[in-house]
Image (cartoon, helix red, strand yellow):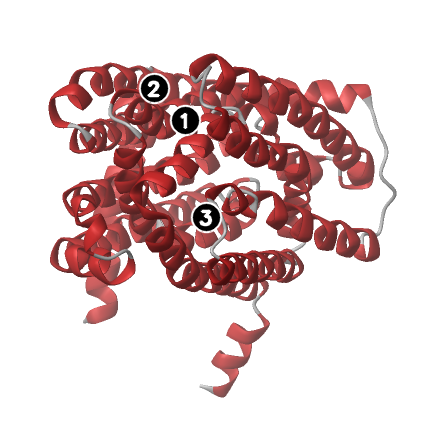
Amino acid sequence: MLEFLKKIRNNQFIGNTNWLIFQNIYSMGLSLVVGALSARYLGPSNYGLIGYGASLVNLFTAVSQLGIDNVLINEMMKHPEEKGRVMGTALCMRAASSITSLICAMILVVLIEPGNRVLWFVAGIQAFAIALRSYELLNEWFLSEMKSKYYVIANICGQTVVGVWKIVLLILGASVMWFAAATTIQALVCGGIVITIFLMTRNFKLGFCWQYGKDIFRRSKYYVMAGLAVALYTQMDKVMLGKMMGETEVGYYTAAMTIAMLWEFIPTAFINSSRVVILEKKTQNEEEYLNKLQLLLFAISILGLLVGLAVQLFGGLAVAILYGKEYMSAVPVLKLLIWSTTFAMIGVARNIWSVAEDKNKYSKNYTICGGIFNLIFNALTIPAWGIFGAAVSTLGAQIVVALVSPLIWKDTRPFVTLYLESWKKGIAYMKKVLV
């Protein structure tokens, strides 16, 4: 037994995952306390204003990322001796795209809301974080080296500073515009620490290579369109709600979505840590690679089912405790949105399969299907059902992206089969363990 515990303690995968889970637990706890207090103080209207601005800005987040994070680990594994030039090239690409995205985001905000100067200011502060968050690409190196604890420490510091910032604003009774600066402050603090730790712990020199830039973009370009489509079907609901129903409705919807997404840190941590292990197994043992991937998919599904059932029972209580009676209109939306998060996590896990099987080019197709579905259904359901209509559209879009759209193309149908078989294998495994 002692030897078994020692192996667990020394296992890099488990240690890496534990750090990622710890970070997200801390973030969740901080958000539950400080975020809920801020939402109560601001009220649904001002809280919705921040959410509305963030949704407009986030439409360009995927463009700024260029999809590089989905392929960078694989590129570094393929060229271990050129890791410095691969990473340096990727960072330059990310910085250039982030600055361009910042400019485009502000142009969009002014065009959509030409007379809303308060929204301009709020969105402008939030958009500045896009350029600052180029450092996030360094997380791929930390993940590849199983050194996520450094990135976690930086994130915890940034989140703590933001938490203190919001508490001070609550004490001073500050306006909504000061609260909008939280995202940018976190990026400044976290980015500074991440870059410092990276420069101190790396064992290579950064460089730049046009050929590596072309190779990275050739493999990641599919994720740019995919990311943009993801932004459309994850942010368009709030954008259309803000435009068609008002900022108060966005406040209710944002509160529901915030609670619904709280549990995602667990599957995200497993996916991030599993990516390196599963991709490595692909080159060594095909059967073991498939087994590990299916185990991951099954674990995400079971966890999502349990969380979904819990929210059906206690969702109203959660909203009342966290946000107060003023936000109770968010309860029906929360009970529907919680199911969409499970399908979203399945879609994220599928990216590992796409990279391993060289099916990256189809990623944009899935999300384009989801984006089109969400756009059409939002236009039809929001005028009739308000925020509940937006939630219905989001759930439908996530199902389309995760499992329906892969059925359209012959090359991607095997993933759906793989997912369905994961249930069969997972249930058999559970029976074996329990018996």
The Cα–Cα distance between marks 3 and 1, rounded to whole angstroms, is 18 Å
Q: In x, y percent, where is residue 159?
A: 56, 57
Q: In x, y percent, where is residue 393?
A: 22, 26
The Cα–Cα distance between marks 2 and 3, rounded to whole angstroms, is 23 Å
Residue on which the image places disc 1: 230
Of labels 2 and 3, the one closer to you: 2
- The foreground one among 146 and 117 is 117
Residue 396 as seen in the image, left or right of residue 147: left
State which quarter of the image contains the C terminus.
Answer: bottom left
- The foreground one among 51 and 115 is 115
Looking at the image, which residue is at 59% across and 72% down?
Answer: 10
Where, by quadrant of the figure, is residue 250 drawn? top left
The Cα–Cα distance between marks 1 and 2, rounded to whole angstroms, is 7 Å
Q: Amino acid at mark 3?
A: Ile
Q: Earlier in the sequence, mark 1 or mark 2?
A: 1
Residue on which the image places disc 3: 271
Does residue 172 appear in the picture of this structure? yes
Q: Amino acid at mark 1?
A: Val
Residue on which the image places disc 2: 371
Disc 3: CA contacts within 10 A as few (<14), some (14-19) or many (>=20): many
Q: Amino acid at mark 2?
A: Gly
- The foreground one among 59 and 327 is 327
Q: Earlier in the sequence, mark 3 or mark 1?
A: 1
Q: Earlier in the sequence, mark 2 or mark 3?
A: 3
Looking at the image, which residue is at 18% across and 30% down?
Answer: 392
- Provide the secondary structure element on which disc 2 rests: helix
Disc 2: CA contacts within 10 A as few (<14), some (14-19) or many (>=20): many
